[in-house]
Amino acid sequence: METRTALFPGSFDPFTLGHANIVERALALFDEIVIAVGINEAKRTHFSLDERLEAIRRIYAAEPRVKVAGYDTLTMDFARKVGAKYIVRGLRSVRDFEYERDIAEINRMEGGLETVFLLTEPKYASISSSVVRELLDFGKDVSRFLP
Ligand code: ADP
């Protein structure tokens, strides 16, 4: 039987409990999840690509169904490269929805990819990488937001 692979793309700067919850639930739907850490030269990140990759790999070291990779191409091209026909994204709010709808439609029309949206669990809805980064910048302990 064909392996059902889904790509979970994002910046993951850093990878939070909200992201981990999406991966955990996506593992119930797909055989394999490729967590794809986007490299965007125009976007300054708090953590380097290597730091982000290493942190995520450590979390899933004991889960052979999760792969972790960096990419600097279009998401649809990277999905094809790793044999993924699905993209997984998390939805926290209508704000996420407006943004995601356009991308999902382009990825379907141009890339033949279906995007599967998982609604965030309410307890994680207010966790975002940007809030975690802001707390870090001011020296706060953010461990309760991270896996
Ligand atoms: P991007 O820069 O592509 O938005 P992020 O790393 O911010 O990358 O997010 C990657 C994915 O994880 C997105 O689909 C986003 O909606 C989802 N996500 C982020 N935070 C949460 C959360 N707390 N709960 C559920 N999904 C989340």
Image: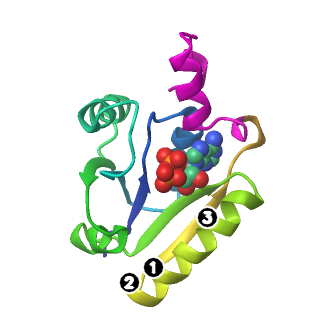
Relative to 10, 99 lies left or right: right
Q: Which residue is mark 2?
A: 111
Q: Is residue 109 above or below residue 26?
A: below
How far apart, in angstroms, are the residues tagged by discs 3 and 1?
A: 14 Å
Q: Is 137 contained in the magenta span?
A: yes
Where disc 3 sits, the SS reads strand
Label 2 neighbour load within 10 Å: few <14, some 14-19, many 20+: some
Q: Do the residues bearing badges 3 and 1 touch, measured as CB atoms within 8 Å?
A: no
Q: Amino acid at mark 1?
A: Asn
Q: Which residue is mark 3?
A: 117
Q: Amino acid at mark 3?
A: Phe
| Occupied quadrant, residue 141 | top right
For the record, the magenta segment spans 124-147
Q: Which mark is residue 129?
A: none
How far apart, in angstroms, are the residues tagged by discs 3 and 2?
A: 17 Å
Q: Amino acid at mark 2?
A: Gly
Q: Do the residues bearing badges 1 and 2 touch, measured as CB atoms within 8 Å?
A: yes
Residue 90 showing in the rendered view: yes
Residue found 26% across the figure and 56% down from its top: 71
Label 3 neighbour load within 10 Å: few <14, some 14-19, many 20+: some
Is the CB atom of the residue marked by disc 3 within 8 angstroms of ligand 1's nearest atom? yes
- Which of these two is toward me, 138 or 3? 138
Where disc 2 sits, the SS reads helix
Relative to 66, 133 lies left or right: right
Residue found 27% across the figure and 75% down from its top: 80
Residue 49, position as x, y percentages in the image = 27, 38
Q: Which residue is mark 1?
A: 107
